[in-house]
Amino acid sequence: MPRYPSPVIGIDVVDIERLRTALARTPALRRRLFTPGELSYCEARPDPVVHLAGTLAAKEAVIKALRLGPLAAWARRIEVTRAPSGAPSARVDGLGSCAVSISHDAGVAVAVAVAFERA
Ligand SMILES: CC(C)(COP(=O)(O)OP(=O)(O)OC[C@H]1O[C@@H](n2cnc3c(N)ncnc32)[C@H](O)[C@@H]1OP(=O)(O)O)[C@@H](O)C(=O)NCCC(=O)NCCS
């Protein structure tokens, strides 16, 4: 019987104002959680924290989908990039890419991640 790769998914939600407070209180968090490429995308937007929250939610969703471990260990090893269309995707150091989708509204950012396990 043929075997197909199994899909794995992860989801996460980030409270935008809670992240804003955390970044104001601990400015070093920006560089601990985000790559230079992520910072340059988000910081070019009118309200960067909205996009940082979506980026953070995407990283946590990838961690759940791939069962990677603590955010502190993986935050900079997962890079969320955007295509010219705006569509996001994630690259995981040593593991390849993971599909992600991000949305933000009503004070929160949410993201889902999908990948396929080898059969
Ligand atoms: C994608 C789209 C539906 C977003 O909807 P929205 O309700 O305004 O915004 P949401 O909060 O739900 O989603 C925003 C997120 O959608 C994602 N996104 C943006 N463009 C996208 C696209 N083309 N495909 C998939 N996801 C996209 C991004 O991750 C964005 O968050 P980020 O900037 O923090 O990364 C809307 O921007 C759209 O219709 N874009 C069309 C893009 C397009 O055709 N561009 C061609 C020009 S080159």
Image (cartoon, rainbow, N blue to C red):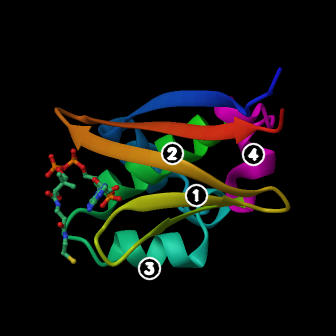
Q: Residues within 10 Å of mark 1 (few under 14, many from 20)?
A: many
Q: Amino acid at mark 4?
A: Ala
Furthest residue toward top: 1
Residue at x 25%, y 71% (from the top left corner)? 45
Residue 56 marker: none
Separation of disc 2 and disc 4 at Cα? Answer: 14 Å
Range of the magenta residues?
64-77
Q: CA distance from mark 1 to mark 4?
A: 17 Å
What amino acid is labelled 1 in the image? Ala
CA–CA distance in space, label 2 to label 1: 8 Å
Quick one: 18 or 56, which is closer to the camera? 56
Of tags 2 and 1, the one toward the viewer is: 1
Q: Is residue 16 left or right of residue 23?
A: left
Do the CB atoms of the residues marked 2 and 3 lie less than 8 Å apart?
no
Task: Report whether 96 appears left or right of 112.
Answer: right
- Reading the image, the residue beneath label 1 is 90
Q: Earlier in the sequence, mark 1 or mark 4?
A: 4
Asked whether mark 2 lies closer than 8 Å to ligand 1, one says: yes
Respond yes or no on whether mark 4 lies under 8 Å from ligand 1: no
Q: Earlier in the sequence, mark 2 or mark 1?
A: 2
Q: Which of disc 4 and disc 3 is earlier in sequence?
A: 3
Name the foreground residue: 96 vs 51: 96
In what element is the residue under mark 4? Answer: helix
Vertically, is 77 above or below 106?
A: below
Q: Which residue is mark 4?
A: 72
